[in-house]
Image (tube, rainbow, N blue to C red):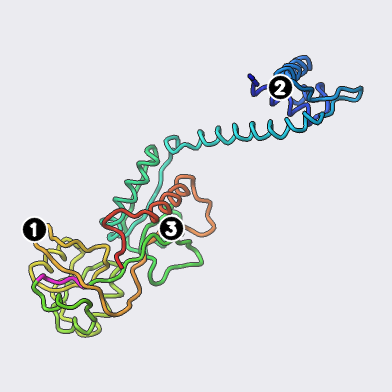
Amino acid sequence: MHIKVRQLVYFLAVADAGSTSRAASTLNVSQSVVTEAVQRLEGTVGAELFTRHARGMTLTHAGHQFLRHANEVLAALRNAESALRERPDTLTGTLHVGVTSLVTAYHLPYLLGHFERVFPNVRVVVREDRRSDLEHRLIGGEVDVAVMNLSGSLDRGALETRTLLRTPWRVWLPTNHPLTARERVSLSDLRGERLLVLRSDEVEDVTALVLSGGADVRVRTSSVEAMRSLVAVGVGVALLPDLLYRPWSLEGDRLEARPLQEDLPRLELGVVWRRGSALPEVARQFLVVTGEFARVQPHGVRARD
């Protein structure tokens, strides 16, 4: 059986119009072309699909049955055509993404790597900034989406959010520190300790809790790698999100991490975009990819409980 798509189109047009002449007018072809296509279709399926009469044509019982299948076939073809038009490798454009410094170093490489593999022809422009500045840039339309800390205050009336991961806090310790003997460390244990503070939007609120207890701050730095090295050689201890922890410094020195006894709010990283805005297609697909990425997080960024 060799049924042509054009025959199905002409059959549906006649079924809808009730005559070959009206169908031909709708299709902008001659009546004889429509008549021949319907007759050939009836010959192929081995059944009369229409009853001919003076006022036009009506579907037979077989015609009604065939009509349902013809609609399904053409709908499937339209869906297949649409899917091909929307292939990831055909999507083009520029995506403006805002990120905070912590995201840039420890989350963005995995996320952008995944997005660019799916959409290789999309140009991604990344802007790193403070969280408060990113909020203004999102609302002002300077960036399409941002990946940043969702903890604390955000303008929820102007911004939509979606959580990608939540990560607990850990105390980083030198391997020979007495607190490594404990399964958990409390904030009170850090009083009097030499504290290393990471200068970052994401951790400043929690660091303030430690500082309020009278901690002895020895180093403030925006470098996580420096924090690892300083902890490993015994300069001090640090309280940081678990997603940043690695057991070795760049110099090859080992450090330990212990869960915090207090149930502090977890650091919540997520994607943010302007509420009520018509997102460009590249940004809409970025949200889809981040949702997929959050369900299967790569090693190194998964929050450990």
Q: Secondary structure at mark 2?
A: helix
Q: Which residue is mark 3?
A: 138
Task: Identify the disc placed on residue 251.
Answer: 1
The residue at 33%/78% (across/down) is 263
The Cα–Cα distance between marks 2 and 3, rounded to whole angstroms, is 59 Å
Along the horizontal axis of the image, is 272 left or right of 27? Answer: left
Q: Which residue is mark 2?
A: 45
Q: Secondary structure at mark 3?
A: helix
Name the amino acid, label 1.
Answer: Glu
Dot 2 or dot 1, earlier in sequence = 2
Could you tell me if the residues under marks 1 and 3 are in contact, i.e. CB atoms within 8 Å? no
Dot 1 or dot 3, earlier in sequence = 3
Residue 2, position as x, y percentages in the image: 63, 19
Considering only vertical position in the picture, is 72 above or below 205?
above
Q: Is residue 141 visible?
A: yes
Q: Nearer the viewer, mark 1 or mark 3?
A: 1
Specify the segment rendered in magenta.
171-175
> Which one is in front, 74 or 2?
2
The Cα–Cα distance between marks 1 and 3, rounded to whole angstroms, is 39 Å
Name the amino acid, label 3.
Answer: Leu
